[in-house]
Structures are given as C-alpha cells and as structure tokens.
Image: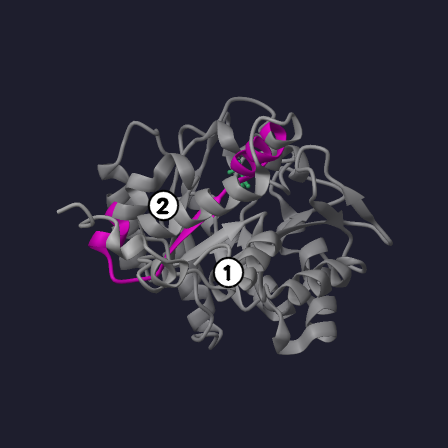
Amino acid sequence: MENRTRRLRSSDTLRRMTRETRLSADSLIYPFFIREGKGIAEDLPSLPGQTRYSPDTLARGIEEALKAGVRSFILFGIPESKDEIGSGAFDENGVIQQALINAKKEFGDDAYLITDVCLCEYTSHGHCGLLAGNQVDNDSTLPLLAKTTLSHVRAGSQMVAPSGMMDGMVEAMRAALDAEGLVGIPIMSYAAKYASAFYGPFRDAAGSAPQFGDRKTYQMDYHNWREALKRIQADIDEGADIIIVKPALPCLDIIAKARGQIQLPVAAYSVSGEYAMIKAAAASGLIDEYKVMCESSVGIFRAGADILITYFAKELAEAIRKGDVG
Ligand code: PBG
C-alpha cells in the first residue's frame, strides 16, 4: 500500500497533470480607484502597491495590467465633492464617467471595464443609500442606482456591479437597462456581501467610511450562511448574471455552497483587508508574500470560485504565467 498516496506526486510533471484546480488570468478582475483631478497617480498607504489615479492617468495603470495579462477591471470612483444623495454617481461628467470615456478611447475592446454601482463613495454621510432620518431608505435608493447604471453604461461600462446590498437593486438596474435596449449588459451582483471589518483599507482608499453608524442593517451578519444563499437566489431571480461572494477568505464555505447550488458564475472578491493583511505580514518578515498570495488565491478557486476580484491580479497573472500556480 505504501505508494498509494504518493504515486501521483512522484514527479513535478505528474503533479501538474493531476492538479484539480486550474487558474487562468482570464478569470481575474483588477480593481482601480479613480479620483477626480488631473495628473494624479498616488500611492495608497492603506493598500501598499496600489495606486489611485485620476481619469487622465488611469491608462497607465491599465497598460501595466494588460502587460501582465489582466484584461478585466472594476472601477471605483472618488468624487471631489459629495452630497446627501450622492449625485456624483450619476453625473455625466462624473469621475467614473470621465475615466470610462478615456479608457474606452485608449483601449477599445482590449480592456473589459466593469463599474461598481453604489452611492457610498458619493454621499456626504457615506452610506450606500439615501437616508430617511438616520436610516437607509432602500426603495428611494433604487431609482438612483438605475440612473447611475445608465450613466456608466453610456460612458462605456461593459458590466455593472451593484454593491450596496439594497433589496431589489438588480431588478431596478435590469429594468433600466432593458428599457434603454441595453439588454446585452450583464449585472454582476454583490449578492452575498458581509458586514466585514476586512473593508477597512478600501474605505480609506475610497473615502467611503460611514460618517455615523455602520452598514449592518444592509450588509450581512457573518454568523449566517443560509441568508447568503437566500440573497444569492433573490438576485438570480431578479436577473443577476454573475454573483459575488465577499469577502473571500473568511467566506470559503459560502463560495463552496453557492457553487454547489447555483448554475451561474460565482465571483469571489478578495477584499482590501485580505490584501493588506498579507502585505503587512510580509513586510514585517512573518510570511512569504508571493507564496501566501498563490496559496490563498488557489484556495479561493478550489472552494469553487470561477472569477477572482483581487488587488494581486497582476502578480497572480505573472505567477500563472510562470507556472507557480496551476
Ligand atoms: C462599496 C464597496 C465596498 C467594497 C466594494 N464596494 C466598501 C464597503 O461596502 O464598505 C469593499 C472592497 C474592499 O474592501 O476591497 N459599497
């Protein structure tokens, strides 16, 4: 019996041949933060190695990523000024709209542009929806998400990703797109998004921390898994084309359960805190950044993800190219 478990490990070629999980740079999505202004390309202290661009410099970031083999991007906008209703989100001349127009002009179909649709970066109070008193008002938020969707797509967004966890957001966006004849634009919904402490560095980078309270009334409690499946199903019923589980590493069970239960592509968002944690531990010499990046990314795919949204996209694409991951 001795070699029963070892035979398939007896050579590097055989180990590679029998790998159960395969990665491809085609499955990666790289996030970009874009702030209003000109000529800006600034380091993000909360996300070491990541850069915040202005609409006119974004092309540099996209160019680098394309060189690494990453072709899909999700864009987050940071407006110069915010207001109660987040009107910068659907401003024709808004930061995301400018970035989309520029990127489209520069790269055409070589770059696949996805936009995050949420109000939190644009509202003065930092919540993902409109307020009624101190509460987020779900239903009055929906028309604004629909409006934001259309303005993104008109500027060149090829896929919209609602992240605000409002009930009915997918349906509202689908209806708006269809009414304009934009039936071919897919919706990738943040269907299972937990109220997570792992979003800290993102909120720093996007300036989107809530000014009071938290997001626990609309994001999910991490004690729950059935709720995640229910919300995923609800988004599918509303017309979602891809569903996102977020964060990734603390939610591998949710990714696996979603994969087992639904027929649509499952995307995992390995969020800012997951990235920052690896970076910080590596910077203090506690772990090997490259190896931990490889292992944790493969783990997310092994759990069942089809798509990975990650700040490590470029490095991971490189690791795939070199054959360090399958
Ligand atoms: C906006 C949004 C957030 C993230 C993606 N879209 C922040 C939040 O919900 O607070 C987090 C991404 C990350 O941490 O990398 N709603």
Q: What colouring style does the render use?
A: one colour
Mark 1: give few (<14), some (14-19) or many (20+) Cα within 10 Å. few
Q: In which quarter of the image is residue 55?
A: bottom right
In the picture of the structure, the residue carrying the numbered disc 1 is 323
- The C terminus: image quadrant: bottom left
- Whether residue 280 is in magenta: the answer is yes
Q: Which amino acid does label 1 sit on?
A: Gly
Considering only vertical position in the picture, is 238 above or below 191? below
Whether disc 2's CB lies below 8 Å from ligand 1 is answered no
The label nearer to you, 1 versus 2, is 1
Along the line of sight, which residue is nearer the eye, 193 or 211?
193
Contact flag, marks 1 and 2 (Cβ < 8 Å): no
Residue placed furthest toward the right? 39
- Whether residue 126 is in magenta: the answer is no
Question: x%, y% of residue 209?
Answer: 60, 30
Q: What residue do we see at 40% from left, 29% from top? A: 217
Is residue 74 visible in the rendered image? The answer is no
Is residue 85 visible in the rendered image? The answer is yes
In the picture of the structure, the residue carrying the numbered disc 2 is 167
- What span is colored magenta in the figure? 257-281
Question: x%, y% of residue 299?
Answer: 38, 45
User: Is 209 left, or right, of 303 in this rendering?
Assistant: right
What SS does tag 1 mark?
loop
User: Is 147 left, or right, of 217 in this rendering?
Assistant: right
Mark 2: give few (<14), some (14-19) or many (20+) Cα within 10 Å. some
Along the line of sight, which residue is nearer the eye, 192 or 61?
61
Along the line of sight, which residue is nearer the eye, 132 or 105?
105
